[in-house]
Amino acid sequence: METQIYNIALLAAIDERLDEMLEDYGDLPEQIKSIEIKLNEKKLLVEETESILNEIKNFVSQAKLTLVEMKDKEEKLSQQQFKVRNNKEFDAITNEIAHIKQEHEKLYDRLRTEGVKQENLMNILEGQQKDVDAVQKELEEKYDEAKRLSGDQNEELTFLQNKRLKTIDLIKSKFIKDYERIRSMHRDAAVTIRKSSCTGCFSTVPAQVIVEVRNHPNQTFYCENCGRVLLPDDLILEDI
Ligand SMILES: [Zn+2]
């Protein structure tokens, strides 16, 4: 599996090439870009809902276990009540049972509420996934339009567009969001650090950042001056 920084570098290279190819097609490249941004926003919503659903799922499975444990404990305490030696012990156990029952009821109620929440979220997720599909289709239509216009460059365009879709899927949507933001300002959104400088704006990159970029290929670091994604100088991209 390629590192995140590799995938971002690849995406940036693909986008630069696509920008070049679509340059003469009026506002089509801008239209494509805005749909790409919209698509990522829709994907982010799906990811958010999925993450909340996951939390609920974990809570539900843990709560179910806890409920069983509470029942067991209550049962054991009830048995013990037959073996008490005095009223004081009897009352203590009675109190404990009452407490467990109360906690059991509370947890049971919460479990039911979370169940309803889960069902609502599943419906929301379904709608959000449909939105993603719709925007994806919108994007494909624009890609097709570009292909129709591109004549003898058609094959390369198809290759790059497919490659872009595949690469996007390998990068977390929240990073894509940052990336798209940078791309709206700079044509080259990701640039190599060379001779301790950002090759986008030529300002010096602090030594500490250079080390971090090199050591954490699954994180993203940005130039403090221009905001572009910084790529390590030893990163070698496949030919596109
Ligand atoms: Zn810079």
Image (cartoon, rainbow, N blue to C red):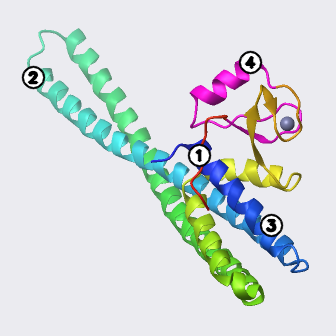
- Local SS, label 4: helix
- Local SS, label 3: helix
Residue placed farthest to the left in the image? 83
Q: Residue at x 49, y 63 (%)?
A: 119
Q: Residue at x 86, y 80 (%)?
A: 25
Q: Earlier in the sequence, mark 1 or mark 4?
A: 1
User: Mark 4: which amino acid?
Assistant: Ala
**Tag 3 residue:** 19
Q: Which residues are magenta?
A: 205-231
Image coords of residue 177 (percent x, y): 73, 52
**Tag 1 residue:** 6
Image coords of residue 188 (percent x, y): 80, 51
Image coords of residue 21 (percent x, y): 78, 73
User: Mark 2: which amino acid?
Assistant: Phe
Position of 128 relative to 202 (above/below): below
Position of 27 relative to 199 (above/below): below
Q: Nearer the viewer, residue 232 or 49?
A: 232
Q: Residue at x 30, y 22 (%)?
A: 96
**Tag 4 residue:** 207
Q: How many marks?
A: 4
User: Mark 1: which amino acid?
Assistant: Tyr
